[in-house]
Image: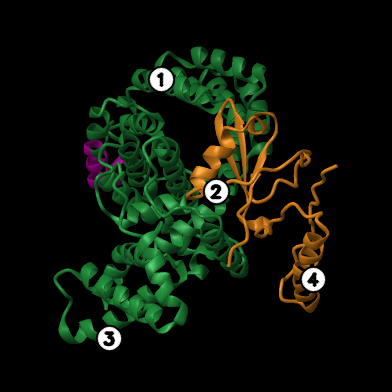
Chain colours: A green, B orange
């Protein structure tokens, strides 16, 4: 039973992708995948798990699909059409050089002509194998809403002629960025889930990492895919220490580093190194490098803040965002002292782009606190407290505020 | 003078008896107007849920899911194209100057 569950997670996407490739029918593909897994549940306990479970499942699903299409009068036409047009064997211009239907599926799910929330839902359903109910719970929407969203997305793919393929070379950069964006959102949703949230929500991190691993493996030349995988692994490695037993936020410098997942960090470093060797730096790789600086410092005091500040500087050139500039200010505040960091933060505050963003006053407050300017720090903590979006953050800022009046 | 008739409807469920009647009426209307020599052509479109909007701005080709009607842009004209798939249609649309000054809604033509 456990073997089937494990195979399920791993192979669902592969099976669905293959049957879509064969028939062009997404609903049929999901149904035939269900049938194949039901057959496995029945036969494997009896006959043993096959040496290649994925191949077994795919064969059963494909046979089932062919059967069903033959029986429908329309089906014979569909099979011929499917063989001829967009759903046939992969076109010769497949730039990845790897014939894997999951890649076609991933790019199609994340096509920019679909609403972003639909891309996310479709990816989780077809590649992740989550049920409609599970996806709905993960994103805190009613199941009906999610079901409709999936139906509409599949209809749009069919009716508007969204091709089932890895995009041609001239579209690949922007489309790959779209796929990475969906995976990163999945990860962040899972990362921000708290202990009280549905387990499905918490499992999104693992799911995002699993899909990112597949993507990185299928697109070995795509440096940013490796960068994103490394970034996710590094964040995930620290997840257990982010909150304490009472659900309170633990700042980075107070986290118990011995509880960080060393294996995940090691994997991340290897992946990142391979990505950087491609010589095509990008935002995910840089963010991963920053996370790696933290992850590889044995103690908070050993953190190479100068390097982190430099990396944020490079990131700012690629992604000119005031949030990046703020993060750089934090790093400068650590590397060159709080006064230097404060200068940058005040400049940002003056520019006004971060109005309403709680981490701006929170950062000011922290720098002022370290400079001993407790009255001003208290004011800033109050400001941050009013803007803070989550309970754990509000409690953290509250405590700091209380410390200022001691 | 030439005119374009833009046929609009609240896209509530096809399958209601009003709808069926109207669909049948389209054909008889077309036959009648062709006989009169006034009908130059016509095309039925898929529902707006299957539309994609295309804008070309400095950031590049920006796509949206669904119809354009939530915006201040108004219909100025239309073209009928034929190509392989939506990616090609988007590419063709993005090269039209209207994609830069406004936006272009790419809507698939109705086919059984």
> Which mark is drawn over residue A169?
none
Counting from the top left corner in percent of width and height, residue A27 is at 46, 71
Query: In terms of sequence position, does the residue under pointer 2 or pointer 4 come before the other?
Result: 4
Region in magenta: A257-270
Q: Tell me the crowding category of disc 2: few under 14, some 14 to 19, or many 20 or more residues within 10 angstroms, Cα based.
A: few
Q: Main secondary structure of the magenta part?
A: helix
Horizontally, is A245 left or right of A83 in the view? right
Query: In terms of sequence position, does the residue under pointer 3 or pointer 1 come before the other?
Result: 3
Mark 3 vs mark 2, CA separation in Å: 49 Å
List the residue tagged with mark 4: B25
Tell me if label 2 and label 1 are in contact, CB under 8 Å. Answer: no
Disc 4: host chain: B
Tell me if label 3 and label 1 are in contact, CB under 8 Å. Answer: no
What element does badge 1 sit on? helix
Counting from the top left corner in percent of width and height, residue A294 is at 34, 32
Quarter of the image where the N terminus of chain B is located: top right
Mark 2 vs mark 1, CA separation in Å: 45 Å
Which of labels 3 and 1 is toward the front?
3
List the residue tagged with mark 1: A314
Disc 3: host chain: A
Mark 4 vs mark 3, CA separation in Å: 54 Å
Which of labels 1 and 4 is toward the front?
4
List the residue tagged with mark 2: B82
Counting from the top left corner in percent of width and height, residue A90 is at 31, 53
List the residue tagged with mark 3: A42
What element does badge 3 sit on? helix
Disc 2: host chain: B
């Amino acid at each position: 039973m456990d073997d089937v569950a494990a195979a399920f997670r791993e192979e669902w996407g592969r099976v669905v992708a293959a049957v879509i490739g064969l028939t062009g029918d997404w609903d049929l593909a999901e149904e035939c995948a269900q049938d194949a897994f039901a057959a496995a549940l029945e036969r494997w306990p009896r006959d043993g798990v096959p040496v290649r479970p994925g191949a077994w499942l795919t064969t059963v699903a494909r046979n089932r699909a062919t059967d069903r299409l033959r029986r429908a009068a329309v089906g014979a036409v569909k099979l011929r059409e499917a063989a001829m047009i967009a759903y046939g064997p992969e076109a010769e211009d497949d730039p990845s050089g790897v014939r894997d239907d999951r890649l076609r599926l991933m790019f199609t799910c994340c096509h920019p002509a679909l609403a972003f929330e639909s891309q996310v839902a479709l990816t989780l359903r077809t590649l992740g194998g989550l049920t409609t109910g599970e996806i709905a719970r993960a994103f805190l929407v009613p199941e009906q809403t999610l079901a409709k969203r999936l139906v509409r997305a599949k209809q749009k793919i069919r009716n508007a002629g969204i091709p089932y393929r890895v995009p041609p070379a001239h579209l690949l950069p922007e489309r790959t960025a779209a796929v990475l964006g969906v995976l990163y959102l999945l990860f962040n949703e899972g990362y921000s889930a708290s202990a009280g949230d549905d387990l499905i929500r918490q499992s999104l991190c693992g799911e995002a990492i699993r899909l990112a691993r597949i993507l990185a493996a299928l697109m070995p030349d795509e440096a940013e895919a490796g960068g994103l995988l490394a970034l996710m692994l590094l964040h995930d490695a620290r997840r257990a220490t982010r909150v304490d037993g009472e659900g309170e936020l633990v700042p980075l410098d107070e986290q118990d580093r011995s509880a960080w997942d060393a294996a995940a960090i090691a994997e991340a470093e290897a992946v990142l190194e391979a990505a950087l060797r491609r010589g095509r730096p990008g935002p995910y790789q840089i963010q991963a490098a920053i996370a790696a600086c933290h992850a590889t410092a044995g103690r908070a005091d050993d953190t190479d803040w100068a390097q982190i500040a430099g990396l944020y500087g490079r990131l700012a050139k690629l992604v000119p965002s005031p949030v990046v500039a703020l993060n750089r200010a934090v790093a400068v505040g650590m590397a060159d002292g709080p006064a230097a960091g404060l200068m940058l933060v005040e400049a940002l505050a003056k520019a006004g782009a971060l109005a309403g963003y709680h981490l701006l006053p929170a950062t000011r407050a922290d720098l002022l606190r370290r400079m001993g300017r407790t009255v001003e720090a208290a004011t800033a903590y109050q400001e941050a407290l009013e803007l803070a979006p989550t309970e754990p953050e509000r409690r953290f800022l509250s405590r700091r505020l209380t410390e200022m009046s001691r | 003078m030439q005119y374009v008739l833009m046929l609009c409807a609240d896209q509530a469920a096809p399958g209601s008896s009003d709808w069926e009647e109207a669909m049948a009426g389209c054909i008889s209307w077309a036959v009648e107007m062709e006989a009169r020599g006034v009908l130059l052509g016509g095309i039925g479109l898929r529902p707006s849920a299957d539309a994609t909007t295309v804008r070309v701005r400095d950031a590049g080709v920006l796509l949206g899911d669904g119809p354009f009607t939530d915006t201040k842009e108004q219909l100025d004209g239309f073209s009928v194209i034929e190509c392989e798939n939506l990616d090609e249609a988007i590419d063709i649309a993005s090269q039209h100057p209207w994609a830069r000054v406004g936006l272009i809604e790419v809507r698939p033509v109705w086919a059984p």
